[in-house]
Amino acid sequence: MFNSYNWGGYLIWALYPDKPVFVDGRTDLYAFNGVLDDYVQVQLVSPGWQEILDRYNVGYVVTEEGGLLTAPGWSAMATVTSSHGVIPCPTGITA
């Protein structure tokens, strides 16, 4: 899974240890091992972003509307809207 920084904290709370997050609020840990640089490259859809997703064996992306969802070959599996700010994790996520 590749997730946006904004979703990381919620996803680690909801899915750990079954589904590891790509990045969360602990940026110091991710900067130390180079993951943060990879995250930024993918998030900005910079050249080489697809190779990064392949290297991490990413099967799906959890992000805000836009970004990777507009890249060729990617489509939205689900769109979630909530006025409460708390969105339950969908069941059946597979990587």
Image: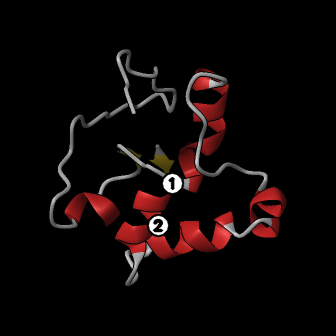
Residue at 39 percent across and 52 percent down: it is 64
Q: Residue furthest top?
A: 91
Q: Position of residue 57 (x, y in %)?
A: 44, 49
Name the residue tied to disc 1. 56
89 w.r.t. 71: above or below: above
Q: Position of residue 10 (x, y in %)?
A: 61, 33
Q: Position of residue 17 (x, y in %)?
A: 66, 23
CB under 8 Å between discs 1 and 2: yes
Residue 25 is at least partly visible in this image: yes
Residue at 39 percent across and 33 percent down: it is 95
Name the residue tied to disc 2. 52
Residue 66 is at least partly visible in this image: no
60 w.r.t. 92: above or below: below
Q: Position of residue 79 (x, y in %)?
A: 25, 37
Q: Amino acid at mark 2?
A: Ile
Image quadrant where residue 93 sits: top left
